[in-house]
Amino acid sequence: MTQLTRDRPALPRVPALAVLEYHLVGYRRTWRAGAFSSFLLPTLTVLGFGVGVGAYIDGGVGGVSYLEWIVGGLLASTAMQVAIAESTWPVFGNLQWQKIYFGQRSAPLRVDDILAGHLAFVLFRVLTSVIAFLLVTGALGALRSPWAVLAIPVAALLALAVAAPTFAYAASVDSDSWLAMLFRFAVIPMTLFAGVFFPVESLPLVLRWLAYVTPLWHAVDLCRAAVLGVAPYWSVVGHLCYLAAWSAGGWLLARRVFARRLVV
Amino acid sequence: MAPPLIQARGLVKRFGDFTAVDGIDVEVGAGEAFGFLGPNGAGKSSTMRMVGCTSPPTGGELRILGMDPVRDGPAIRARLGVCPQLDNLDPELTVRENLTTYARYFGISRRVARARAVELLDFVQLSDRADSKVEPLSGGMKRRLTIARALVNEPEIVLLDEPTTGLDPQARHLVWERLFRLKQQGVTLVLTTHYMDEAEQLCDRLVVMDGGRIVAEGSPRALIEQHATREVVELRFAAESQEAFAGKLNALGERVEVLPDRVLVYVPDGDAAVAEVAALGLNPTNVLVRRSSLEDVFLHLTGRTLVD
């Protein structure tokens, strides 16, 4: 009986943290390139759109300069791009190519731990990118209000709202060409029409409602309000609940697909 | 007597209409080296995944370390080491990082993980590659690293799914030697293979699986005694068809098997049989007397038809 009752090392207290740690170790090799683009990308977009395009927009938007108006939206769309990029090929590869998830499954981790650990890493990537974005735009004088720091938790919530369903999608497709479709038919249209570059109100009514349905618009409205230091167009609680609903729905979907793939 | 570490009764695994494992009974005791032998599609890997607590059984009863694999999955896996058929190492990490990050899944502290990585890399002879990436390693090195990773939690049972498939002879021998050493340390080994020499070298006891069922069970020696004769005479005749000679050879041994290029005669005494062949006036162009092997048992039990 000694065999069966022998004391074993305890399991990790929070197994998902061990999974997060694995992803961070991998990121240590590529963080320089990542950090560089985290700073470069917002600088270029802010300069290109805010200063470049803004020069053609007389009188700005709603009483603020185009640069100040656009920066909140760009922050939200940056958060979304990073979140989705980190949830497509990396998830697909861990399942289909390097089969990392299967290795983790053989350890005393549950499917939820594997999923939560990887999502936590995506969150980490989004948070670092968003903080870099705020530092750069702040240095360029594009932030009107100290309330801008509130854009950080909003970006985190947006990241979950888009990353969780993307995990489900990337884990359910059988070919990585479906991932490129996601960018073509979801990410790019969202970026263009969810109020990042121009107010949603200038769209025809039908398209306006499509914009309202996207998680991005809700985060754009909140982030813009935060960096401008004004009230958002729609209810704060409403926005947060809507993003939380995407996160929760995405999580439930993702764990279902992960379980189907990993428990066979 | 200590209870078995692995106990399966009427174990079944179905995927839709397909039955991969069709009601098998298996018991593995502490310190044993146990083998699942069988052609591709026999149900070996499905069985291993159920034992590894990553695949819930469809039917029957399964206890691992006295626990229920569905309810106590993480607690059981904490005490298992798994070396899957296909390596799932992280090619971007270094050899060492693959071990230390994996150790963390078992709640092992970073300090202990680092120390254990050093020991294990020494054990699988990869110390000089500790800080190189996994990607450029040879197949044999990756396999050894996967085996090292399976040992990072000092498991009581190590599951190895085709541990040497695809390796060159040198690499295979090195893996065998390491596994043998583990066995000597008292680690319970459960492996699948379709290499007979591997099973003969490593396994105390094995089952032969075919079509999801167990068709024979015993030690390699016992299986040979039970399902084959002591020796085999292989005769090759110059004629187009070997068939013509088979009839005349029937009286010589317990069993005669006709292959396209030769005739196998299963006999207790090979040299005596060869003398009888000459006495019958047959003139084979080629004669070989050898001890029968597990391969003869295997082919006898599972047939010679190719399974892809």
Image (cartoon, grey):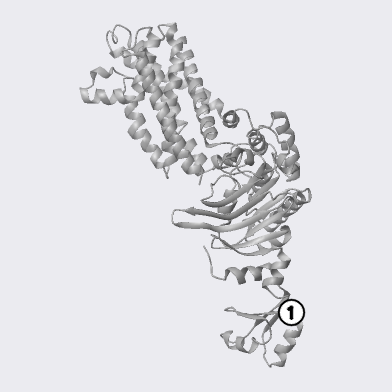
Q: Is residue A49 above or below residue B222?
A: above
Residue B97 falls in which quadrant of the image? top right
Residue depicted at x 39% and y 18%: A240
User: Which of the 4 quarters of the picture holds residue A202?
Assistant: top left
On the question of residue B174 being in view, the answer is yes
Q: Position of residue A75 (x, y in %)?
A: 41, 18
Left/right of residue A260 with respect to residue A102 in the rendered view: left
- x and y percent of residue B194 in the render? 62, 61
Give residue B275's position: percent from left, percent from top. Answer: 74, 88
The residue identified by callout 1 is: B268
Residue A188 falls in image quadrant: top left
Specify whether B243 is left or right of B126. left
Amino acid at pointer 1: Pro
Instruction: Please state which of residues A12 and B134 is positioned toward the viewer in this rendering.
Output: A12
Q: Chain of mark 1?
A: B
Q: Is residue A11 left or right of residue B112?
A: left
Q: Is residue B96 above or below residue B276?
A: above
